[in-house]
Amino acid sequence: MSVPCFLSAAVRSFRLSSPATGLLCCRLLGHSSSIRRNMSSKRQMDHLERTASNYRQNTLYPAEVCGIINESDTVKRLRIAVHPDFIFKAGQWVDFFIPGVETVGGFSMCSNPGLLQREGVIELAVKYTKHPPAHWVHTMCTVGSSVAMRVGGEFFFDPSPSDPSVDLLLVAGGVGINPLYSVLLHTTDLLRLNQASGGRDCNIGSAHLCYSAKNTQELLFKGSIIEACREFPDKLSCDFHVTQQSTDVDPHLQPFIKRGRIAEEELRAHVDPQRTMCYLCGPPPMIEAISKTLMDLGLPKDRILFEKWW
């Protein structure tokens, strides 16, 4: 369900009353004391507390939901018309303010900056939970709902033409695909621009996505991920991992499916300590284990960026 994506006068004059909480934690590898403190805390910290030391913009922008898609049985994708001054980098998140809901959400964009430039919209994919912002998305949000958003986060991919080429290794678990899908889409846009300019824009290396979910139904965006890999087969590749698949896999997905968790052998094939930049997003235990494996494979910790969903 969708409507033309522009902000109504009512939304442009939108005001909020009470900020509070969310469910996201973003950290750079190496801040081990912060990680240990967060993971050992008995009281679950809210989104604004967890991200208090992270960069965020100063401006809170009004926005309006202009489309809602059932991405899976448990995930809704919101298409949101935003203010003309709204900007973000691939991989960042938003503080998500909802009128009448005290708790502030924290959701990563799953769309890329190119979509914002072309159509004036962003997209968020939100998994159902009883956490108030996610619960509102699944039970009360409708086309035309007014919200407000503020961009934040230090987890992003935003290369400039003068930057040296890097090979991206993107590792996602569950709904942790959101910021990495944004990065992959942005990389695809850069590859198209580079192709159109005859190689005069960004010097883009390769990107490989390792994406793990319970089953193929929970693999979000799989169709467009495969399309991107087929458009640039020499630059983009992906492997989908399913850990609890109980039905037959669709034939068109079969070439991309691996049973079981992401293994060291797969990571090894895509790690070059001099060229690889790894972005990880998923549950904390997965991030801890894969981060250790990557360092054991020789990837420096300053080339491992991660975002944990709590």
Image: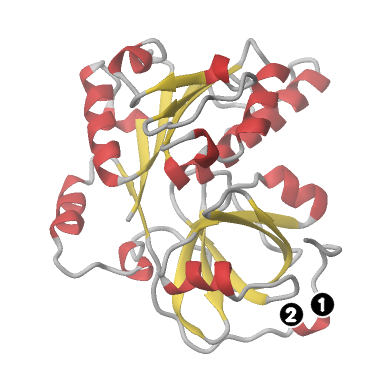
Q: Which is more toward the observer, 109 or 221?
A: 221
- Residue 241 lies, in percent from the top left, at 43, 26
Question: Dot 1 corresponds to which residue?
Answer: 8
Looking at the rendered structure, the secondary structure element under dot 1 is loop
Separation of disc 1 and disc 2 at Cα? 5 Å
Q: Which is more toward the observer, 125 or 93?
A: 125
Side (left or right) of 46 relative to 38 = right
Report the amino acid beneath label 2: Val
| Residue 157 in sight | no
| Residue 222 in sight | yes
Work out whether 267 lies above or below 22.
above
Circles 1 and 2: CB distance less than 8 Å? Answer: yes
- Residue 50 lies, in percent from the top left, at 31, 63
* Residue found at x 28% / y 30%: 290
Work out whether 206 lies above or below 61.
above
For the residue carrying disc 2, how many other residues have a C-alpha within 10 Å: few (<14), some (14-19), or many (20+)?
many
Label annotation for residue 11: 2
Q: The C terminus lies in which quarter of the figure? A: bottom left
Label annotation for residue 103: none
- Residue 6 lies, in percent from the top left, at 82, 67
Q: Which is more toward the observer, 266 or 151?
A: 266
Q: Which is more toward the observer, 251 or 271?
A: 251
Looking at the rendered structure, the secondary structure element under dot 2 is helix
Report the amino acid beneath label 1: Ser
- Residue 51 lies, in percent from the top left, at 36, 62
